[in-house]
Image (tube, coloured by chain):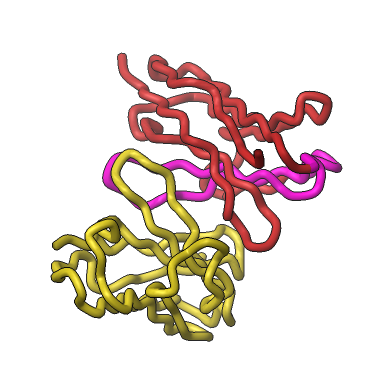
Chain colours: A red, B yellow
Amino acid sequence: QVQLVQSGAEVKKPGASVNISCKASGYTFTKDAIHWLRQAPGQRPEWLGWINPATGNTKYSQKFQGRVTISRDTSATTAYVEVSSLRSEDTAVYYCARGGIPLWALWGQGTLVTVSS
Amino acid sequence: DIQMTQSPSALSASVGDRVTITCQASQDIKMNLNWYQQKPGKGPNLLIYGASSLHTGVPSRFSASGSGAHFTFTIGSLRPEDIATYYCQQYDNLPYAFGQGTKLGI
């Protein structure tokens, strides 16, 4: 079964970092990019960046450059996103999504990150 | 960055109605546009890609058209299970961006 399975919900204090995983199964992990997006409550989804699992090359939204790091472990067929210097505005559901054609046809189930003191 | 604007932001319709949503890009994005359905507590679900191609398994009552900067999405005959928020999304240029969404109610 082709799927992306994400790690569980997180509660973090302002200034902390969070690391979310996205495990791919049912397809060749290195074939398509993995994208990361987030959706704050009541807002539209927002693209954070993507990684080419074959090469490790990354591309980030300028808005998050320097605060978001995307990585992967090909042996574990898993991609990761780390968000640092968390603030309350980073409270959101974070999603991974598969690239390729069509783009973002497959999504993870989402990971709720709550930033609260 | 490319801005995506949907209208209307909210829409109330009846079962069996034909429903149309429009999406405008701030510049030419050719046909690099997706449409998604999102239900409460769930992630976005791809319905249409490449501006007009129906994704696998999506009912044929959903359709879309357009190119350049102007796009439309149509539900041919509304069903109760279509109650959701619908988003357009461009993938012509980074950063990929979504419209603000259209909340569809009955």
Q: Position of residue B46 (x, y in %)?
A: 49, 59
Q: Residue at x 57, y 79 (%)?
A: B31
Residue B74, compared with residue B41, is above or below; it is: below
Q: Residue at x 27, y 75 (%)?
A: B77
Query: Does residue B91 belong to the magenta stretch?
Result: no
The quadrant of the rendering that contains the C terminus of chain A is top left
Q: Main secondary structure of the magenta part?
A: loop
Q: Position of residue A39 (x, y in %)?
A: 40, 43
Residue B46, compared with residue B25, is above or below; it is: above
Q: Is residue A10 visible?
A: yes
Q: Residue at x 61, y 36 (%)?
A: A4
Q: Which residues are magenta?
A: A28-57
Describe residue B20's horizontal placement relative to residue B12 as left or right.
right
Describe residue B51's horizontal placement relative to residue B70 as left or right.
right
Q: Position of residue B52 (x, y in %)?
A: 52, 78
Q: Is residue A49 visible?
A: no
The quadrant of the rendering that contains the N terminus of chain A is top right
Report the front residue among A62 and B32: B32
Q: Residue at x 38, y 74 (%)?
A: B61
Describe residue A115's horizontal placement relative to residue A42 as left or right.
right
Q: Count the marks: how many?
A: 0
Report the front residue among B68 and B37: B37
Q: Quadrant of residue B76?
A: bottom left
Query: Does residue A43 belong to the magenta stretch?
Result: yes
